[in-house]
Image: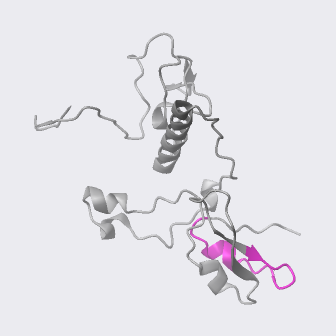
Amino acid sequence: GLVTDSGELIPAQTVIISIGDVPSLSFLPDSVEVVKVAGGSWIKTDESGRTTDPKIFAVGDVERPGLATNALGAGKRTGEYLAATLKGEEWKPFTKKLIKYEALTIAHYDPAEEKGDTENHQAARCLSCGSCRDCHLCETICPTHAISRREIVADDPDGVNYEYVSDDTKCIACGFCADTCPCGIWTMQPF
């Protein structure tokens, strides 16, 4: 469980603390390798979240500092690895190109205070994982109608079933799509 500042006990089987701070790893057995960087220590992991101890996995701020979306992605990655392993299947790591944090914009996201403060309200907030959310803003803002949405057949039934494409014969490189995309999907490249 978790004891609050007021002394109240909140019962729980597992408590996960996620505050974006340098972790205290003194509880770990010696079988888990720790990497020291800039005065902090983090758990060394491979791309599936495995540590040097085969019984221990690590995700989020204990393996490297980052955003909430980094921790969520790490948890998803490790969960997928564990699920595949338990099913006796080969695990395939995420291979999509990640969008640079600097390319993301929060201009089209609602501020947290407007969403409410309950667990359900917070869970409904988009934290921008850098994936297209199919908002049509790029398609709508393009002055030459160079961007179009196209349905595609995905190998994975849970996968994306659309893509946005730009027609190079119509694009005038105005940059409106890159400026308006809340997920950082569109970028401008110099000629």
- Using the rendered view, name the quadrant where residue 104 is placed: bottom right
Q: Is residue 77 above or below residue 167?
A: above
Give the camera-side residue of 135 and 84: 84
**Magenta segment: does it hold 173?**
yes
**Magenta segment: does it hold 48?**
no
Q: Is residue 118 above or below residue 38?
A: below
- Furthest toward the top, the residue is 30
Residue 128 is situated, as x and y percent measured from the top left of the image, at 52, 60
For image coordinates 37% across by 39% down, the residue present is 18
**Which residues are the magenta region?**
165-183
For image coordinates 35% across by 57% down, the residue present is 123
- Using the rendered view, name the quadrant where residue 90 is placed: top right
For image coordinates 63% across by 68% down, the residue present is 161
Quadrant of the drawing holding the C terminus = bottom right
Q: Is residue 189 above or below residue 13?
A: below
Residue 30 is situated, as x and y percent measured from the top left of the image, at 48, 10
- Furthest toward the bottom, the residue is 144
Quadrant of the drawing holding the N terminus = top left
Residue 3 is situated, as x and y percent measured from the top left of the image, at 17, 33
Residue 154 is situated, as x and y percent measured from the top left of the image, at 67, 62
Q: Is residue 18 above or below residue 144?
A: above
Q: Is residue 113 left or right of residue 23?
A: left
Q: Is residue 7 left or right of residue 133?
A: left
